[in-house]
Amino acid sequence: RKEVEQDPGPFNVPEGATVAFNCTYSNSASQSFFWYRQDCRKEPKLLMSVYSSGNEDGRFTAQLNRASQYISLLIRDSKLSDSATYLCVVNNDRDDKIIFGKGTRLHILP
Amino acid sequence: EAEVAQSPRYKITEKSQAVAFWCDPISGHATLYWYRQILGQGPELLVQFQDESVVDDSQLPKDRFSAERLKGVDSTLKIQPAELGDSAMYLCASSSIPGRRDGYTFGSGTRLTVV
């Protein structure tokens, strides 16, 4: 089993729709979780950290379920500019090792 | 906003040649990572430094790859000899301690093409 697994893509979603990404991780010792966004041929950029209580930033909501070792990202009212690859990132704080998922490509359709 | 500097942005090299990439992390960031990202895949860790010490290089192909961070600040990743399969984006990232809640900042990457 891979350490971090994400939904296979691509997701083709009409503008204005809600889209959800899922991610599972295998290391129960993982402590920090993030969603990164990566545009084509660019470096990954932090979208948001994921907190145990769940957190929201505008149209973006992140959830963490430690028992199921599952992370999610919800994008509401999707915009054309949301088209990108979304990477799930998990960190084992003890050794500061960060593991990336393969990413899920999102295409928002006009 | 503080940035991680990487150079060069693009590099084309012939197979069997040597190539080197440079990274200057955000000032004060003790942890530095080198990642390789093949098109369509997520970044894969090559080497992790804590100050000048290697913390994890288990995925670094040591027969041809080397990395150093002599003074615990900037870092160099070298490939010798380069192979066709090394064509990828090489990303450098840094983080502070503590700082995990801030995530990790990536440089713009070096896109390597081996011909």
Image (cartoon, helix red, strand yellow):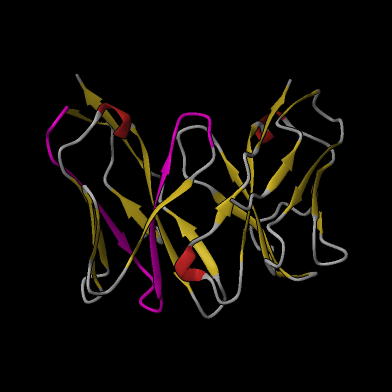
Q: Residue at x 80, y 62 (%)?
A: B73
Residue drawn at 75 percent across, 49 percent down: B23
Q: Position of residue B67 (x, y in %)?
A: 79, 55
- Give residue A41's position: percent from left, percent from top: 53, 29
Query: Is A67 situated left or right of A34 in this image?
Result: left
Image quarter of residue B7: top right
Answer yes or no: is residue A21 visible.
no
Quadrant, the N terminus of chain A: bottom left
User: Magenta segment: does it hold B11?
Assistant: no
Q: Residue B110: x, y in percent?
A: 68, 36
Magenta highlight range: A15-42
Residue shown at 69% from the left, 63% from the top: B57
Q: From the viewer's side, name the closer residue of B74 and A28.
A: B74
Q: Judge from the rendering whether residue B78 lies leftward or rightward of residue A80; answer left or right.
A: right
Where is residue A15 shown, x and y percent of the image? Answer: 16, 27
Q: Is residue A1 above or below residue B55?
A: above
**Above or below, A21 relative to B108:** below
* Residue A40 relative to residue B10: left or right: left
Q: Could you say which is closer to the camera, residue B43 or residue A34?
A: A34
In the rendered view of the protein, which quadrant contains the C terminus of chain A? top left
- When asked about the image quadrant of residue B90, the answer is top right
A41 part of magenta stretch: yes
Q: Nearer the viewer, residue A109 or B60?
A: A109
Q: Is residue A22 visible?
A: yes
